[in-house]
Image (cartoon, rainbow, N blue to C red):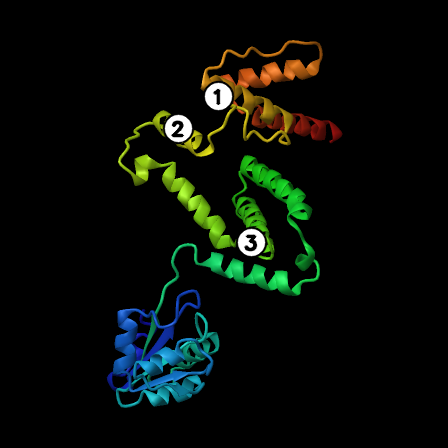
Amino acid sequence: MNATTADATAPDQGRIVLLTTSHRVAPGLLSWPAWQALRTADRVLCADGAHPQLPYLREAGIRVDEAAPTAEELVDACAGGRTAVVVATGEGDPALTDGLARLAGSGRVPMPDLELLPASYDLPGARLLDLVQVMDRIRLECPWSSQRTHRGLAKYAIEEAYELVEAIEDGDRDELREELGDVLLQVVFHARIAEDDSDAPFSVDDVAGTIVDKLVHRHPHVFGDEKADTPEEVRAHWLRTKAAEKQRTSVTDGVPLGQPGLALAAKLASRVRTAGLPVPLPTGEGVGYQLLALAARAESEGTDPEAALRAAARTYRDAIRAVEG
């Protein structure tokens, strides 16, 4: 990226390269253009003597001056066609770039070519590493978080899941992103607590590894040789592999009884229907049996009874507010 204009640049004023790196990538893993710029530079500077890249640069034979030049000093260092590479701290050096921008805008001096060169890039999911590090520090230093247990946090997982569902149903994208983060926090928090268990510790990497293995195993049409061209065939693959993994003795195994009643009824009805079991719905007096029948009917018709009831309740809420004025 060239940040100068032709009329403000003189051919003999050299080149400034601002080298940015990511702390989420192992030090020393720099791009080839970055290494070329470092090896051909007349001078390499870094304001941070503790920058994680410095030992690796020096091991590779790059001389790095620990200095924090001003914009004017850096421009002077490039006089005569020389190239100066600045190894930026973190992901940039705003003070220096702002100073260079002001200097260029003043028109007082001819400016060198200015190039922003990413030396390393974040991979997708890299910010998850930041979350793990932040959670680790909070767990160690926060008086409240350091005392939390799985059981004590359980209610928050339920609350956050409901808030996520509400954001989805509202169609609010900003709220959706925030609520997804809150749910993700619950996963990372529980994984961090699990690391402290003296009998059976596990980490967030173990959690991620478990779900990765499960997803790969249950998608043989993606990661293996099986074929699936329709959602129905995918579901069949999923059910077969899941049944082989769990080796359940009843179709009701693994159905959490603590979930909301309509969801529980629909899940049981789905298990019965999928397995083809001739289990009629129980009959009896009272609204409970009527709700059970409605939930089973909704499930057989492809309707989520919980979502349907929530939608109806929202309409009812809006009607109440309208009456209230």
* Amino acid carrying mark 2 in the image: Arg
Expressed as whole percent of the image width and height from the top left, the position of residue 282 reads 62, 11
Label whose residue precedes the other's in the sequence (1 or 2): 2
| C-alpha distance separating marks 1 and 2 | 21 Å
Quarter of the image that includes the N terminus: bottom left
- Does 63 sit left or right of 253 as displayed? left
Examine the image and state in which quarter residue 40 appears.
bottom left
Examine the image and state in which quarter residue 104 appears.
bottom left
Quarter of the image that includes the C terminus: top right
Contact between labelled residues 1 and 3, with CB atoms less than 8 Å apart: no
Q: Residues within 10 Å of mark 2 (few under 14, many from 20)?
A: few
Expressed as whole percent of the image width and height from the top left, the position of residue 256 reads 59, 31
Expressed as whole percent of the image width and height from the top left, the position of residue 89 reads 45, 75
* Amino acid carrying mark 3 in the image: Pro
Residue 187's place in the image compared with 287, above or below, is below
Can you identify the residue that label 1 sits on? 302
User: In the structure shown, which secondary structural element does the residue marked by tag 2 occupy?
Assistant: helix
Q: Residues within 10 Å of mark 3 (few under 14, many from 20)?
A: few
Q: Nearer the viewer, residue 130 or 145?
A: 145
The dot on residue 201 is 3
Residue drawn at point x = 64 percent, y = 25 percent? 261
Can you identify the residue that label 2 sits on? 240
* Amino acid carrying mark 1 in the image: Gly
The dot on residue 54 is none
Q: Nearer the viewer, mark 3 or mark 1?
A: 3
Residue drawn at point x = 38 percent, y = 36 percent? 218
| C-alpha distance separating marks 3 and 1 | 41 Å
- Does 180 sit left or right of 315 as displayed? left
Q: Nearer the viewer, mark 1 or mark 2?
A: 2
- Does 169 sit left or right of 124 as displayed? right
Task: Return the residue found at the far right.
Answer: 324
Q: Nearer the viewer, mark 2 or mark 3?
A: 3
